[in-house]
Image (spheres, grey):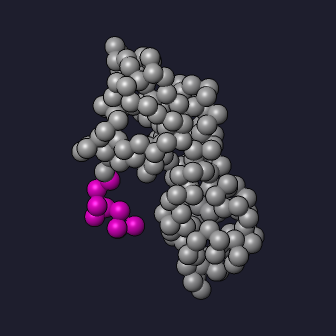
Amino acid sequence: MHRAQSQPRKYEEFAFVLDFNSRGKSSTVRGRDGIIIIAIGEDRLTLLEILGIPNSTFEVGEKIFIGKEGRTKISSVLGKMDYNKISSSAQSELETVVEKIVTLNESRFVEYLNNAQPLTPRIHALELIPGIGKTYMKTMLEERDQKKFESYEDLQERVGFKEPIKHISERIVDEITGQSRMNLFVKR
Protein backbone atom coordinates (compact mmCIF):
# COMPACT_ATOMS: atom_id res chain seq x y z
CA MET A 1 0.00 0.00 0.00
CA HIS A 2 2.85 2.43 0.70
CA ARG A 3 3.96 2.69 -2.90
CA ALA A 4 0.90 4.70 -3.82
CA GLN A 5 1.76 7.46 -1.35
CA SER A 6 5.32 8.00 -2.53
CA GLN A 7 4.19 9.30 -5.91
CA PRO A 8 1.24 11.69 -5.54
CA ARG A 9 -1.56 10.88 -7.95
CA LYS A 10 -1.20 13.17 -10.90
CA TYR A 11 -3.95 14.42 -13.13
CA GLU A 12 -5.03 12.38 -16.12
CA GLU A 13 -2.68 12.31 -19.09
CA PHE A 14 -4.89 10.52 -21.57
CA ALA A 15 -8.57 10.06 -22.18
CA PHE A 16 -10.62 8.10 -24.68
CA VAL A 17 -13.37 9.84 -26.64
CA LEU A 18 -16.90 8.55 -26.05
CA ASP A 19 -18.76 11.25 -27.95
CA PHE A 20 -18.26 14.78 -29.23
CA ASN A 21 -20.35 17.61 -30.55
CA SER A 22 -18.59 20.07 -32.83
CA ARG A 23 -21.09 22.78 -31.93
CA GLY A 24 -21.77 21.88 -28.34
CA LYS A 25 -22.38 23.77 -25.13
CA SER A 26 -20.62 22.79 -21.93
CA SER A 27 -22.82 21.30 -19.25
CA THR A 28 -20.16 21.74 -16.55
CA VAL A 29 -18.90 25.29 -17.22
CA ARG A 30 -21.42 28.00 -18.03
CA GLY A 31 -20.96 29.81 -21.28
CA ARG A 32 -18.29 27.55 -22.74
CA ASP A 33 -19.08 26.25 -26.18
CA GLY A 34 -17.33 24.77 -29.18
CA ILE A 35 -16.16 21.22 -29.69
CA ILE A 36 -17.45 19.52 -26.56
CA ILE A 37 -16.01 16.06 -26.00
CA ILE A 38 -17.19 13.45 -23.53
CA ALA A 39 -14.33 11.14 -22.65
CA ILE A 40 -13.16 8.68 -20.04
CA GLY A 41 -9.81 9.14 -18.33
CA GLU A 42 -7.44 6.26 -18.93
CA ASP A 43 -6.07 6.17 -15.42
CA ARG A 44 -8.82 7.21 -13.03
CA LEU A 45 -11.63 5.99 -15.30
CA THR A 46 -13.74 9.07 -14.61
CA LEU A 47 -16.02 10.66 -17.17
CA LEU A 48 -14.76 14.02 -18.34
CA GLU A 49 -16.08 16.92 -20.35
CA ILE A 50 -13.35 18.37 -22.54
CA LEU A 51 -13.17 21.37 -24.84
CA GLY A 52 -11.50 20.69 -28.16
CA ILE A 53 -9.39 23.19 -30.07
CA PRO A 54 -11.47 24.72 -32.93
CA ASN A 55 -11.23 22.75 -36.20
CA SER A 56 -9.73 19.67 -34.52
CA THR A 57 -11.32 16.39 -35.49
CA PHE A 58 -12.11 13.58 -33.12
CA GLU A 59 -13.23 9.99 -33.40
CA VAL A 60 -15.10 7.81 -30.95
CA GLY A 61 -12.62 5.50 -29.21
CA GLU A 62 -9.68 7.78 -30.01
CA LYS A 63 -7.03 8.22 -27.33
CA ILE A 64 -6.38 11.92 -26.76
CA PHE A 65 -3.68 13.63 -24.72
CA ILE A 66 -5.11 15.80 -21.97
CA GLY A 67 -2.01 16.24 -19.80
CA LYS A 68 -0.83 19.68 -18.70
CA GLU A 69 2.01 20.19 -21.18
CA GLY A 70 1.88 19.91 -24.95
CA ARG A 71 -1.79 19.43 -25.72
CA THR A 72 -2.42 19.54 -29.43
CA LYS A 73 -6.15 18.98 -29.87
CA ILE A 74 -7.79 20.03 -26.66
CA SER A 75 -7.90 23.41 -25.01
CA SER A 76 -9.17 22.41 -21.58
CA VAL A 77 -10.67 19.77 -19.39
CA LEU A 78 -13.90 21.40 -18.29
CA GLY A 79 -14.88 19.02 -15.54
CA LYS A 80 -16.07 15.63 -14.38
CA MET A 81 -19.40 14.29 -15.48
CA ASP A 82 -21.95 11.91 -14.06
CA TYR A 83 -23.01 8.95 -16.13
CA ASN A 84 -26.63 10.08 -16.21
CA LYS A 85 -25.57 13.47 -17.62
CA ILE A 86 -23.65 12.16 -20.64
CA SER A 87 -25.24 11.70 -24.07
CA SER A 88 -26.94 8.43 -24.88
CA SER A 89 -24.40 7.76 -27.62
CA ALA A 90 -21.57 8.24 -25.10
CA GLN A 91 -23.38 5.81 -22.82
CA SER A 92 -23.68 3.26 -25.59
CA GLU A 93 -19.96 3.52 -26.44
CA LEU A 94 -18.85 3.16 -22.83
CA GLU A 95 -18.52 -0.62 -22.73
CA THR A 96 -16.46 -0.82 -25.94
CA VAL A 97 -14.13 2.01 -24.89
CA VAL A 98 -13.67 0.58 -21.38
CA GLU A 99 -12.76 -2.80 -22.92
CA LYS A 100 -10.18 -0.99 -25.04
CA ILE A 101 -8.65 0.61 -21.91
CA VAL A 102 -8.63 -2.72 -20.04
CA THR A 103 -6.97 -4.36 -23.05
CA LEU A 104 -4.31 -1.65 -23.49
CA ASN A 105 -3.52 -1.50 -19.77
CA GLU A 106 -3.16 -5.24 -19.26
CA SER A 107 -0.19 -5.09 -16.89
CA ARG A 108 -1.97 -2.59 -14.63
CA PHE A 109 -5.11 -4.73 -14.31
CA VAL A 110 -3.18 -7.99 -13.95
CA GLU A 111 -1.20 -6.32 -11.17
CA TYR A 112 -4.47 -5.36 -9.53
CA LEU A 113 -5.58 -9.02 -9.61
CA ASN A 114 -2.20 -10.07 -8.24
CA ASN A 115 -2.49 -7.71 -5.29
CA ALA A 116 -6.23 -7.52 -4.56
CA GLN A 117 -7.01 -8.01 -0.86
CA PRO A 118 -10.08 -8.84 1.22
CA LEU A 119 -12.29 -5.77 1.70
CA THR A 120 -13.99 -7.13 4.80
CA PRO A 121 -13.55 -10.44 6.62
CA ARG A 122 -16.29 -11.85 4.40
CA ILE A 123 -15.78 -10.17 1.03
CA HIS A 124 -12.68 -10.27 -1.12
CA ALA A 125 -12.13 -7.57 -3.76
CA LEU A 126 -11.78 -10.29 -6.39
CA GLU A 127 -15.32 -11.50 -5.71
CA LEU A 128 -16.70 -8.14 -6.79
CA ILE A 129 -15.51 -8.76 -10.33
CA PRO A 130 -18.32 -10.38 -12.31
CA GLY A 131 -17.69 -14.03 -13.05
CA ILE A 132 -15.38 -14.55 -10.07
CA GLY A 133 -17.19 -16.45 -7.37
CA LYS A 134 -15.76 -18.19 -4.31
CA THR A 135 -14.35 -21.06 -6.38
CA TYR A 136 -12.42 -18.97 -8.90
CA MET A 137 -11.30 -16.66 -6.14
CA LYS A 138 -9.85 -19.56 -4.12
CA THR A 139 -8.02 -20.90 -7.18
CA MET A 140 -6.76 -17.41 -8.07
CA LEU A 141 -5.40 -16.83 -4.59
CA GLU A 142 -3.71 -20.24 -4.51
CA GLU A 143 -2.21 -19.74 -7.97
CA ARG A 144 -0.96 -16.22 -7.36
CA ASP A 145 0.70 -17.35 -4.11
CA GLN A 146 2.70 -19.85 -6.17
CA LYS A 147 3.50 -17.33 -8.89
CA LYS A 148 2.03 -13.95 -9.80
CA PHE A 149 -0.08 -13.80 -12.94
CA GLU A 150 1.78 -12.38 -15.90
CA SER A 151 -1.07 -11.70 -18.29
CA TYR A 152 -4.77 -12.22 -18.90
CA GLU A 153 -3.85 -15.32 -20.87
CA ASP A 154 -1.75 -16.67 -17.99
CA LEU A 155 -4.72 -16.10 -15.67
CA GLN A 156 -7.11 -17.84 -18.06
CA GLU A 157 -4.82 -20.85 -18.45
CA ARG A 158 -4.03 -21.32 -14.77
CA VAL A 159 -7.42 -20.53 -13.28
CA GLY A 160 -9.81 -21.30 -16.10
CA PHE A 161 -11.36 -17.85 -15.67
CA LYS A 162 -12.66 -16.97 -19.14
CA GLU A 163 -12.64 -13.51 -20.72
CA PRO A 164 -11.04 -11.51 -17.92
CA ILE A 165 -11.13 -8.34 -20.05
CA LYS A 166 -14.88 -8.58 -20.47
CA HIS A 167 -15.44 -9.19 -16.75
CA ILE A 168 -13.13 -6.43 -15.52
CA SER A 169 -14.72 -4.05 -18.03
CA GLU A 170 -18.17 -5.02 -16.80
CA ARG A 171 -17.14 -4.16 -13.25
CA ILE A 172 -15.76 -0.77 -14.35
CA VAL A 173 -18.95 0.03 -16.24
CA ASP A 174 -20.99 -0.89 -13.14
CA GLU A 175 -18.85 1.50 -11.09
CA ILE A 176 -19.21 4.31 -13.63
CA THR A 177 -22.97 3.88 -13.93
CA GLY A 178 -23.27 3.91 -10.15
CA GLN A 179 -24.55 0.37 -9.86
CA SER A 180 -21.90 -0.69 -7.37
CA ARG A 181 -21.58 0.61 -3.85
CA MET A 182 -17.81 0.25 -3.75
CA ASN A 183 -15.27 1.18 -6.37
CA LEU A 184 -12.32 -1.04 -7.11
CA PHE A 185 -11.16 0.74 -10.26
CA VAL A 186 -12.93 4.05 -10.73
CA LYS A 187 -11.53 6.93 -8.70
CA ARG A 188 -14.13 9.15 -7.13
The residue located at (73%, 64%) in the rendering is 162
* Residue 63 in view of the camera: yes
Residue extending farthest to the left is 69
Specify whether 71 is left or right of 110. left
Query: Where, quadrant-wise, is the N terminus in this rendering?
Result: bottom left
Residue extending farthest to the bottom is 146
Locate residue 30, reporting x and y percent.
35, 15
Locate residue 134, reporting x and y percent.
73, 67
Query: Where, quadrant-wise, is the C terminus in this rendering?
Result: top left
Does residue 40 show up magenta in the picture?
Answer: no
Foreground of the two, 76 or 70: 70
Q: How many tags in the picture?
A: 0
Residue extending farthest to the top is 31
* Residue 119 in view of the camera: no
The residue located at (59%, 78%) in the rendering is 144
The residue located at (57%, 25%) in the rendering is 87
Residue 150, picture quadrant: bottom right
Q: 52 above or below 25? A: below
Q: Which residues are magenta?
A: 1-9
Locate residue 147, reporting x and y percent.
57, 83
The residue located at (53%, 25%) in the rendering is 85
Q: 151 above or below 23? A: below
Locate residue 89, reporting x and y percent.
61, 28
Q: 117 above or below 64? A: below
Residue 138, picture quadrant: bottom right
Specify whether 71 is left or right of 27. left
